[in-house]
Amino acid sequence: MTSEGKHADTVLFIQESEELYRNPTEVKMSQIVLPCHANHCGELSVGQLLKWMDSTACLSAERHAGCSCITASVDDIHFEHTIGVGKVVNIIAKVNRAFTSSMEVGILVTCEDLYTGKQWKVCHAFATFVARRTEAGKVQLKQVIPRTQTEQMEYSLAAERRRMRLIHAEIITDLLSSSTAQLGECQEYQDAVPAERTRVESVELVLPPHANHQVSTFGGQIMAWMENVATIAASRLCNAHPTLRSIDMFHFRGPSHIGDRLVLKAIVNNAFKHSMEVGVCAEAYQGGEPLRHINSAFMTFEVLDSDRKPSTLPRIRPEPVDGKRRYQEAVARKKIRLDRKYIISCKQTEVPLSVPWDPSNQMYLSYNNVSALKLMDTRNNWVLTSEKNKVRLYTLEENHMLCFKVEMHVSVPAEQTFHLLSDLRRRKEWDRHYQECEVINKADEEDTLYRIATPSVSKGGKGQDFILLASRRKPCDARDPYLIALRSVTLPTHPPTEDYTRGEVLCAGFTIWEESSTGTKITYYNQATPGVLPYISTDIAGLSSSFYSAFSACSRFLETNKDSLAALPPSAL
């Protein structure tokens, strides 16, 4: 992220905080970093920061739930800066969305220099908390009511992040299996450090100061102990003091309580040129009972030189059997991590139009695809350009990109509308710009790759073709629409040809809102840089005419075909 982008994020958050309205779930914590909080370099220990983040987020969750809550999981955390002694750490946490008994809490950490007044972003994280059962039984959380555009955006994206969390473990397991099978044998390096030298095992007795008000061990305390042993393991590899850069998404498998003996194990799984992956495991026991698995995590470290640049690290020599498996899985995880950071962490203006698609990044491309459409749906600065036959056309120009929004209402049930519009092969029945449409790959029930061909917009010119990823989503609950998100991707099996000019779509798609059992509101969005879509070559009058013609035909198409879907059983839909 650029420095301008970081500054803009911070300024936006500060401006929102200064408004009269304040989110009722928002909790703030400010701490001066003292020497007792710091490591040997005079920088705030990441373990201490994790404890503060967990405490703040837990208080936010409990403010919304009205009962005690426990940490269930934490998404990827990337630490952009270290924090020195004397600086102030500001943490803001608020509930983005509540589900049945769990909720997503967004956490923003900034650093403040009291002498200059400057502030900068350190990290942004999302944690999931679960409300504990009460004497009356299982908790049913009340819904979060978003009030601002930013809250609406986070509310909408929370459903997509939750979906990714639920399938994350299964997807990662499949990707690791397929990736490691292609890696072959581990490479041998001279002067490589034996992995066994980096192994660390430590035990902690959970005492009352380590527990929260529910007599359970603080999730943040467990994370802090895990960070401690991981740092020792990383130090043994490089004989230097490492800096923690990121923690992969992890889940707490079970609770820990006062009196537990917590066994923490860490080892360097693999070392790359400028970074290393450390695997950490936390297990608990009391008395003679068997070990209970509490948590596992993967942490990425760097060693910075005097110029704060990453140093070259020594190679690792894995131990036989399990060591080689960990070594190969670390290579696969690094690729997954880079894909995830590249696709998800970048802003829309920083992501290239077409990203290569393959099974290893499908989950993240799908997330990015749907998230981009949801972001467009939450914007409130659209300008009504024209209206005809109850079809409204809006435009918005931002960052040298022209965005379109078409809105109409149909007397067709929302679910049937969703299924008719989500099959792009049928779009040519109502949109003359869809001349050809073929399915390239049906990745799963929610993601399909298509090749679309459109006619030339000028006499004698070439037509355009597009390779599109179509991601469809049903509502998470009644406050969500049906979604059909479209974006360009590249496939090595379908390179550009001489017969067509390859077009690209950054973000397009439909949101479909159920207004009644037979009434539906359809909104179509399209965002593109000038010249990449057939619509862009015309003036606004011609553009309006094209959209009105297409969506009037779309309305007739839906009315005509609704009965054919109504006769099908729900399972067929």
Image (cartoon, helix red, strand yellow):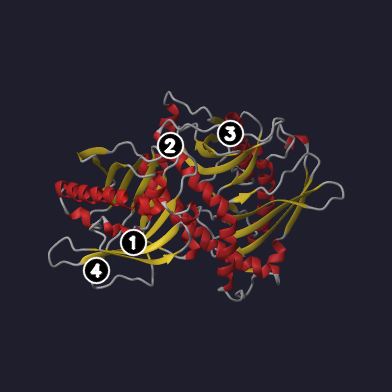
Work out whether residue 384 or residue 182 is closer to the camera in this orientation and state it. 384
Q: Which residue is farthest left?
A: 459
Q: Return the residue at label 1.
A: 425
Q: Return the residue at label 2.
A: 152
For badge 1, the amino acid type reads Arg
Q: Position of residue 427 (x, y in %)?
A: 30, 57
Q: Is residue 246 visible?
A: no
Q: Return the residue at label 3.
A: 141
- N-term-proximal mark, 1 vs 3: 3
In this picture, is 320 found above or below 66? below
- N-term-proximal mark, 2 vs 1: 2
Q: Quadrant of the C terminus?
A: bottom left
Give how far apart the Cα atoms at labels 3 and 4 are.
53 Å
Per the rendering, the mark at residue 500 is: 4
SS class of the residue under badge 1?
helix
Verify CB contact (< 8 Å) between mark 1 and mark 3. Answer: no
For badge 3, the amino acid type reads Leu
